[in-house]
Amino acid sequence: MSAGQGTEAGNPPAAETPGQIGARLMAGRKQRQLTVESVARQLRLDVSVINALESGDTRHLPAPIFVQGYLRSYARLLGLPEDELVSDYTRESGALPPLTVKRVNGRKSLVRLPSMRLLRNIILIVLAMILLWLAYPALNRMLVQTDQSEDGRSPGHLEIPPAEH
């Protein structure tokens, strides 16, 4: 239950009406000395949407899922409890609650696929090995030619034996 709801003399708690949710938003906005236009600008919403939220006019509001997001953003801006306002609106409007993702603890698959990073690295290594294998003959010829040209003599050098007397 949200704050401010209680049971008096056995009466069930009354759900907040859109006007009460809107009144809380309007009171929070006035307490922070914000105008409707400044709130609309900060939330990137139309002024008519802010007015409809504060007055509880559901005819000028979009689908409830969007209204829940607007309420959450508006409450965050004003420092009001977001989850409480959204749950009050959901309960009052009869809209489905926001979706949540829950992990199901089921069987783990027998085959676990490697991560994309690992696959990328393996592919890069295989490509590097193929390139080295293809480049080996050319590298080998270059090394052999280099070894033959470095036998101690430089091209164009002529050695003259010493003259014998």
Image (cartoon, helix red, strand yellow):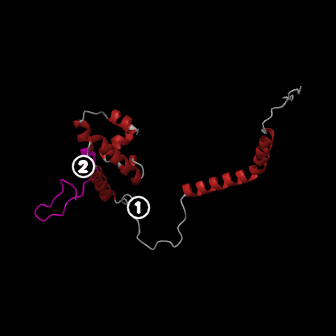
Q: Are marks 2 and 1 in contact (CB under 8 Å)?
A: no
Query: Is 109 rendered above or below residue 75?
Result: below
Residue 158 on the magenta span: no
Q: Nearer the viewer, residue 51 or 41?
A: 41
Specify the principal SS of the magenta part.
loop
Q: Quadrant of residue 106?
A: bottom left
Q: Nearer the viewer, residue 165 or 142?
A: 165
Identified at 33% across, 45% down, the residue is 53
Q: Could you say whether the residue bearing mark 1 is in a helix, strand or loop?
A: loop
Q: What residue is disc 1 on?
A: 101
Image quarter in which the N terminus is found: bottom left
The number of callouts visible is 2
Q: Quadrant of residue 114?
A: bottom right
Identified at 25% across, 33% down, the residue is 33
Q: Which mark is residue 153?
A: none
Image spot of residue 57 (x, y percent): 34, 47
Stretch of the chain drawn in magenta: 1-24
Identified at 38% across, 42% down, the residue is 49
Left or right: 8 in relation to 73: left
Mark 2 is surrounded, within 10 Å at the Cα level, by few (under 14), some (14 to 19) or many (20 or more) other residues, namely some
Q: What residue is disc 2 on?
A: 20
Q: Looking at the picture, which amino acid does disc 1 mark?
A: Val
Image spot of residue 18 (x, y percent): 29, 51
Query: Is 122 rendered above or below residue 36?
Result: below
Left or right: 121 in relation to 134: left
Q: Nearer the viewer, mark 2 or mark 1?
A: 1
* Distance CA(mark 2)–CA(mark 1): 30 Å
Image quarter in which the C terminus is found: top right
Residue 16 on the magenta span: yes
Q: Nearer the viewer, residue 65 or 61?
A: 65
